[in-house]
Amino acid sequence: QVQLIESGGGLVQAGGSLRLSCAASGRTFGRYHMAWFRQAPGKEREFVSTHKRSGSNTYIAYYGDSVKGRFTISRDNAKGTVYLQMNNLKPEDTGVYYCAAGTSSYVIYETSGYDYWGQGTQVTVSS
């Protein structure tokens, strides 16, 4: 069982930056693909980024088209934490951001590929 706790959300003006953090419980953090999804009001949960495990200590980052070049995902296995650095934020980035953990190597862009979810943190970008 993995528990995920997000933090770092808030209100920011367009063009600003935020860094989200997701702290995971458990000793096997390094074996999980760690992802961020977001959900705007009235919309489905959308893939943002994932840090996919590709070897014993190797990871590959993937991003949704709408955030490429602006967001950066990273992790610190020693701290059991994954981060999402968000730069040049836009009003359309507004939503609840969820951290997720999973081990499926084939479904990394869909919510079904992840087994554990955090409660979410609100990000609001004003124009």
Image (spheres, grey):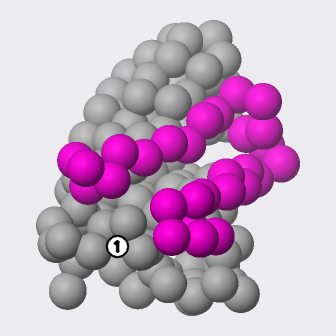
Residue 50 % position (x, y): 60, 59
Observer-nearest of 11 and 24: 24
Residue 14 % position (x, y): 61, 14
| Placement of the C terminus among the 4 image quadrants | top right
Q: Quadrant of residue 59?
A: bottom right
The residue at the point 23 percent across, 62 percent down is 24
33 in relation to 57, above or below = below
Residue span colored magenta: 53-80
Q: Quadrant of residue 60?
A: bottom right
The residue at the point 50 percent across, 42 percent down is 74
Amino acid at dot 1:
Trp
Q: Looking at the image, how many numbered discs can be counted on the residues?
A: 1
| Viewer can see residue 100 | no
Observer-nearest of 33 and 43: 33
Q: Quadrant of residue 66?
A: top right
21 in relation to 1, above or below = above
The reply, left or right, for residue 92 in relation to residue 2 is: right
User: Is residue 69 in the magenta section?
Assistant: yes
Find disc 1 in the rendering and name its residue: 117
**Would you call the spot at circle 1 few (<14 residues within 10 Å), some (14-19), or many (20 or more)?**
many
